[in-house]
Image (tube, rainbow, N blue to C red):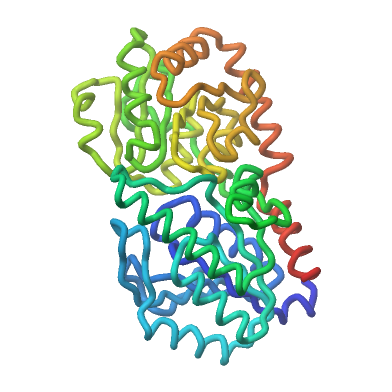
Amino acid sequence: MNNQAQQKKIAIISSLYMPHLGGVEKYSHSLARTLTADYEVHVFCMNTESVPAESRDGDIFIHALPCGGFFKGRLPVPTPKAIRRTKQIFRETGFHFGIIQTRLYPFNLQAAKILKEYQIPFFLIEHGSAYVTFGNRLINLLWEYYERYQTNALKRYCSNFYAVSQASLDWLNHFGIQGKGIIHNSIDPQEFEGIPSSWRKSVGIPSEAILLTFAGRIIQKKGIVTLLTAADRIKEERLHIIIAGDGDETLLNPWKQNPQIHFLGKVPHRVLLEILKDSQLFCLPTTYPEGLPTVILEAGYFGVPVIATDMGGINEVISDNKTGKIIPPDDPESLRSAILELIRDEEERNTLGAELQKKISAEFTWQKTAQEVKKIIESI
């Protein structure tokens, strides 16, 4: 370990963080864990999960700060005490660098002000690729106004913007921001070591079954209804659908009695990896403004071909008929055809999976991404 780097202290600002589940949370945790090899890493987050205010996760120092919330809990807002506590920790710790995850959260704007005030260099990583929507026209308009206001305020303090995908980098242009580069979402190969291949046996699914897995929040925008509608049209006894995630369970009611569809709710990450390793297909027919979903990288690392829509950064990983299948959004019939094709053609399934595995292993590991982040830190 480099002694000079060992002395440097990094503050990662991630308003939502583990154990809260989501793509940004997983990204922040993985980046923090990887950077601890060379830096002292502190994560500042909103205490949305009632965890201890100060804790350690391995070598990561975690500061969970008091907050309130708006927009169905998606927008945690720091209390005045949280801002005072953050300034106190900054004064006492003496950070050398800061990393802010996304533009969206009020605490991230406050953190940018503090970083600027203490003359600490930092950059921001964008994770979105379009406006978040809530199924309500008025709320959608309020959110767009809020996001434009928040971004314009951030631009006064932050001059270094990066993104998790090309789609996210392009989205920054919408706000008049010229991003400086891509810091891809990635996976850590060590997490995949020792994962057993016996999950289906533990839940009584036949060994000859074709497992198609969906993992994500149960919301309309993630394409869960599109997937289940397509599954209804497939008359194939070998096909079993695995649904892992929580959210609006009323969306699932029409299919609750189907013995070939397994609704698991929220599962621990280790269990999800067991499911993915035992799967033959992964499906994410999302219309959500994705950055670069972690779960398609995880499925791909196991050599599981992915069927997905062309949303956000997905097409930077999934190339149609090369590493998976790209289907139109909200199109159950196209999804049905893609699923049937890969069920019936084992050779194509294996070829797509092998090519995707090769791509993930070569381009999307945290070890590789961390080296890029370290270069940026040292250059700024």
Q: Closest to the observer: 31 or 312? A: 312
**Percent of width and height locating residue 180:** 73, 57
Which picture quadrant has residue 80?
Answer: bottom left
Q: Is residue 95 left or right of residue 291?
A: right
Which picture quadrant has residue 315?
Answer: top right
Residue in the picture at 23% in, 24% down: 255
Looking at the figure, which quarter contains the C terminus?
Answer: bottom right
Looking at the figure, which quarter contains the N terminus?
Answer: bottom right
Which picture quadrant has residue 244?
Answer: top left
**Percent of width and height locating residue 51:** 35, 71
Q: Is residue 123 visible?
A: yes
**Percent of width and height locating residue 337:** 46, 11
Residue in the picture at 32% in, 28% down: 225
In the rendered image, the vertical position of residue 21 relative to residue 152, given as above or below: above
Q: Is residue 28 left or right of residue 140?
A: right
Q: Is residue 31 left or right of residue 375?
A: left
Residue in the picture at 36% in, 76% down: 52
Q: Closest to the observer: 45 or 174? A: 174
In the rendered image, the vertical position of residue 246 relative to residue 377, given as above or below: above
**Percent of width and height locating residue 185:** 61, 49
In the rendered image, the vertical position of residue 366 relative to residue 357, given as above or below: below
Residue in the picture at 69% in, 65% down: 160
In the rendered image, the vertical position of residue 169 relative to residue 239, given as above or below: below
